[in-house]
Image: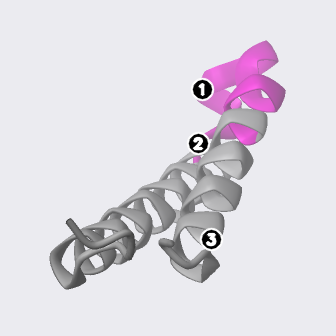
Amino acid sequence: MSEEGGFGINVAEKFLGLIIFIVGILALYYTVTSSDALAGFTGLFDFLSIILIILGFILLIVKVE
């Protein structure tokens, strides 16, 4: 067996990273635009959205070995 990651795994990782990144951006957008409805939970949802954005970005830039 080859020790290198397959092409399909690399593409799947990049696609998943892109999806997570987009979901994080959309979550951050909707959190900011509806902050009055969220009241005290705006900070929590901002934090969770930023975590999704960072995770998606990391998945986009790393290489599978």
Looking at the rendered structure, the kind of residue marked 3 is Phe
Residue 41 versus residue 59: which sits nearer the camera? 59
- What's the CA distance linking mark 2 and mark 1? 6 Å
In the image, taking residue 26 as reference, residue 57 lies left or right, namely right
Residue 26 versus residue 6: which sits nearer the camera? 6
> Which quarter of the picture shows residue 53?
bottom right
For the stretch drawn in magenta, what is the main secondary structure?
Answer: helix
Magenta stretch contains residue 36: yes
In the image, taking residue 34 as reference, residue 23 lies left or right, namely left
* Label 2 sits on residue: 34
Residue 13 versus residue 38: which sits nearer the camera? 13
* SS assignment at label 1: helix
Which residue occupies 80% across, 15% down? 40
Which residue occupies 76% across, 24% down? 44
* Label 3 sits on residue: 57
Asked whether the beta carbons under mark 2 and mark 1 sit within 8 Å of each other, the answer is yes
* Label 1 sits on residue: 37
The image's colour scheme reads one colour
Range shown magenta: 34-46
- What's the CA distance linking mark 3 and mark 1? 29 Å
Looking at the rendered structure, the kind of residue marked 1 is Ala
Dot in front, 3 or 2: 3
Q: Position of residue 4 (x, y in %)?
A: 38, 76
* SS assignment at label 3: helix
Q: Position of residue 41 (x, y in %)?
A: 73, 18
